[in-house]
Image: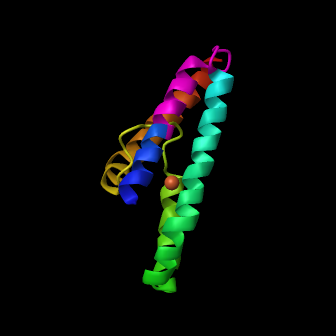
Amino acid sequence: MVDDRLAEERQAKETLTVLVEGGVDADRFDAGILLLRDAVLEHARHEERSEFPLLREHVPAERLRTLATALKAAEAVAPARPHPGTESAKANLAAGPVLAVADRVRDAIRSAAG
Ligand SMILES: [Fe+2]
């Protein structure tokens, strides 16, 4: 189940990378963003219907609250752009903050130049 969700997340990041690189004026942007929307919604349904009930059944509520706090902290330093290949927890921990800083520096430079 985890492998399937990670594969979906990787696919979404790859699609998002193509869409970002092509820009909103690209011929296939509109169709691509709709496909991405549908894929992300389906991914979320899988998580909500399959993963979350199992977590609630097998993980103590206090542990889930701790994980939620850790997730919010991780989101605060998450990369601002898709980076396919960083779906695993280890890769996210290792590369996430570095990519986040790189993304934000790139955005700041573009903003200053624009
Ligand atoms: Fe997900």
Q: In this view, does 68 lie to the left or right of 95?
A: right
Q: Is the magenta stretch mostly helix, strand or loop?
A: helix
**Rendered residue at 49%/51% (across/down):** 77
* Residue 20 among those drawn in magenta: yes
**Rendered residue at 53%/74% (across/down):** 53
Q: Position of residue 104 (x, y in %)?
A: 52, 36
Q: Where is residue 84 in the image (x, y as percent from the top left)?
A: 40, 37
**Rendered residue at 64%/31% (across/down):** 33
Q: Where is residue 3 in the image (x, y as percent from the top left)?
A: 36, 54
Report if residue 26 is visible in the image: yes
17 is higher (above) or lower (below) than 8 = above
Closer to the camera in the image, 71 or 1: 1
Q: In this view, does 66 lie to the left or right of 92?
A: right
Closer to the camera in the image, 36 or 75: 36
Looking at the rendering, the stretch of residues picked out in magenta corresponds to: 12-28
**Rendered residue at 32%/49% (across/down):** 91
* Residue 98 among those drawn in magenta: no
21 is higher (above) or lower (below) than 96 = above
Of the 4 image quadrants, the one containing the C terminus is top right
99 is higher (above) or lower (below) than 42 = above
Report if residue 72 is visible in the image: no
Of the 4 image quadrants, the one containing the N terminus is bottom left
Query: Residue 20: which quarter of the image?
Result: top right
